[in-house]
Amino acid sequence: MRFPFHRIATARNGLMAIAVVALGACSATDGPSLVSGATTATPDATTAAAVPTQFLKSSYCPPIQIRAGTEAMTIYERGHDNESAFVRQQASITKTARECRVAGNELAIKIGVSGRVVAGPKGGAGSVTLPVRVAVAKQIGGAGPLYTNLFKVPVTLSAPTFGKTYQEVFNVSVPVGPQDRDLIIFVGFDEGKK
């Protein structure tokens, strides 16, 4: 039996021509993209404004530290500052934590602070309000803090220990730009001017 080779060759050449045309259509830039969400880049840079979130990774979160000299606070009876026999309460900040999220042009930060308050020789059961300062600043070249706020943290002491561990979470929002990758978070007690 003889095979009609000329018919097979003609059919194969026809199929190859159809495949070439189909592949050419896939690579055309005028038609709809085969990749979901794909866009065609435009050479005109003025058509799209730079958005800070394009430059800041969602995982970016500034380091946090307790500012030196503000990790502890001693409250004395009035008129007896720096006299150990007249200490009412002693407070400390021992742990910090932070969690960040970029939302538009803002860096939203949850800042956690914990520590302990104990009664001194002149202390006892009762409430004390801890003044905790939170500030966000540039590590290099900043003229001042980008954010600062004084939070009041109430702590109640009771018998029999007259001591209590406290923990507080503060929500902070800071405007950011593409260059804001050198921020730092400071926390500490702020007793104001004495």
Image: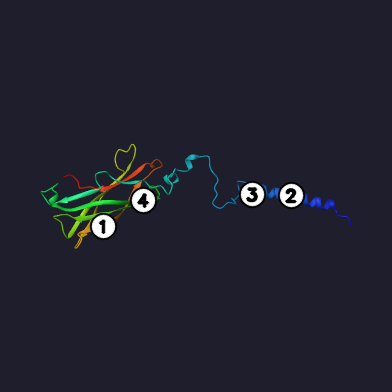
Q: Position of residue 3 (x, y in %)?
A: 86, 55
Q: Quadrant of the N terminus?
A: bottom right
For disc 1, the marked residue is: 165
**Residue 26: mark:** 3
Mark 4, residues whose alpha carbon is within 10 Å: few (<14), some, or many (≥20)?
some
Which amino acid, by three-letter code, is at mark 1?
A: Thr
Residue drawn at the location 28% of the way across and 51% of the way down: 94
Q: CA distance from mark 1 to mark 3?
A: 66 Å
Q: Nearer the viewer, residue 157 or 102?
A: 157
Give the foreground label among 1 and 4.
Answer: 1
Q: CA distance from mark 3 to mark 2?
A: 15 Å
Element carrying mark 4: strand
Q: CA distance from mark 4 to mark 3?
A: 44 Å
Element carrying mark 1: strand
For disc 4, the marked residue is: 108
Q: Nearer the viewer, residue 160 or 48?
A: 160
